Image (cartoon, grey):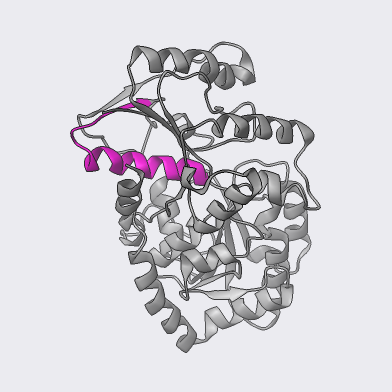
Amino acid sequence: MRIGFDATVLAPGTRYTGTGQYAENLLRVLPMLAPDDQFLVYGTPPAAGFPPLPANVTWHPLRRLPIGRLSALAGHLLVLPRMVRKDRLDVLHVPGVHTRASLPPVPRGLACPLVVTIHDLIPMNYYGHSDTPLPWRLRAFYRWNLNSALKAQRIITVSEDSRTEIIETLGLPPERVTAIHNGVDPAWGARGDGSAWKPPHGQTPYILFGGSFEPRKNLARLLQAFQRAVDTGIPHHLLMIVETSSAHAPPVRELAEGLPCADRLHFLSGLDDASIRAVYQHADAFVFPTLSEGFGLPPLQALACGLPVVASDLPVMREVLGEAVQYIDPSSVEDMASALVAITSDETLRTKLLVAGTRQESNLTWKAAGEATL
């Protein structure tokens, strides 16, 4: 088979998003699992930190039309369909559905079958009913882009929770939607010498958050809960891996600067692969207080690093993480603070979670995800 793969999400601005990491890890394993198939990858190889791919992979740079922020949209609607026809693809896989017109949309009018991954319906179902709705332009583009995705012959999603939501919300036949769990790269648990990155505050222990400034990630409540935990006497700092820039960042940063524990709060962004893994591997615990999620890859990566994890008590989190984490009510600052104190001081709890975590993360691999995707 001649399998097309849209890798434009591996551009610097989106490579380390959930969709970017999904695409990158699938691209690592699919060609090895299907050595007799030809993979035509549309996009430009990442500049650094991406391993050589097998001989059955060919990169096809996608020409961007010189029309500013809409170049990605025009390229996927005009250029990519022509390349698909010229390359005689048997199938094209698009690994995500974006909300911004500046990011690649799902192409239309292809000369081959299409498979699209819809990770979740958060832009529609969560932000459609939250106190922080998406701007109308994003809502309109997402709906248009989602309609393009619904023309695909098959849809992949990343959890049974998301699959149920997609089928019920969009009225799709169940047989068109397949749930395939994400995996975790074994390299996350392989500790290096630590030279790639050092904590900004020396050797003081820290709790780690991995996510973004996006309101559903619940960072404001986490800051308030961390302050309460510090008031009880824990010696930890809080490190937060977030995006470099975000319209949601100013109120969160302002809240952080006004807290008594401000000197223990550290926002990290722009880290390379090795540094991100080092941040995880040197942490004392991981916290993930999300309000809505399609899968939740960061806490799974934390389990692979041998970290005890605090996570929101949501159906999708229990589906992915099982009993390997300390669950919290994400709407309760008090519950979150109590969990942070327990996860850093109760050795019996930490040992119990670490044992369960080792079993849980070993069940979710990118190899298994790749086999199911093929």
Q: Say whether residue 368 is visible.
A: yes
The front one of 224 and 137 is: 137
The front one of 162 and 334 is: 162
The front one of 300 and 258 is: 300
Q: Quadrant of the C terminus?
A: top left
Q: Say whether residue 229 is visible.
A: no
Is 338 placed above or below 253 here?
below
Magenta highlight range: 17-41
- Residue at the right extreme, as displayed: 131
Query: How many labels sit on residues?
Result: 0
Q: Quadrant of residue 123?
A: top right
Residue 120 relative to residue 94: left or right: right
Q: Which secondary structure is most common in the magenta stretch? A: helix
Residue drawn 54% across and 28% down?
Answer: 106
Residue drawn 46% across and 33% down?
Answer: 153
Residue 257 painted magenta: no
Residue drawn 78% across and 34% down?
Answer: 136
Picture coordinates of residue 238, whole percent (x, y):
59, 65
Picture coordinates of residue 28, whole percent (x, y):
31, 41
Picture coordinates of residue 67, whole percent (x, y):
61, 12
Residue drawn 78% across and 45% down?
Answer: 133
Residue 23 painted magenta: yes
Is 216 placed above or below 141 here?
below
Is 109 placed above or below 225 here?
above
Q: Quadrant of the N terminus?
A: top left
Picture coordinates of residue 351, whole percent (x, y):
42, 83
The front one of 206 and 63 is: 63
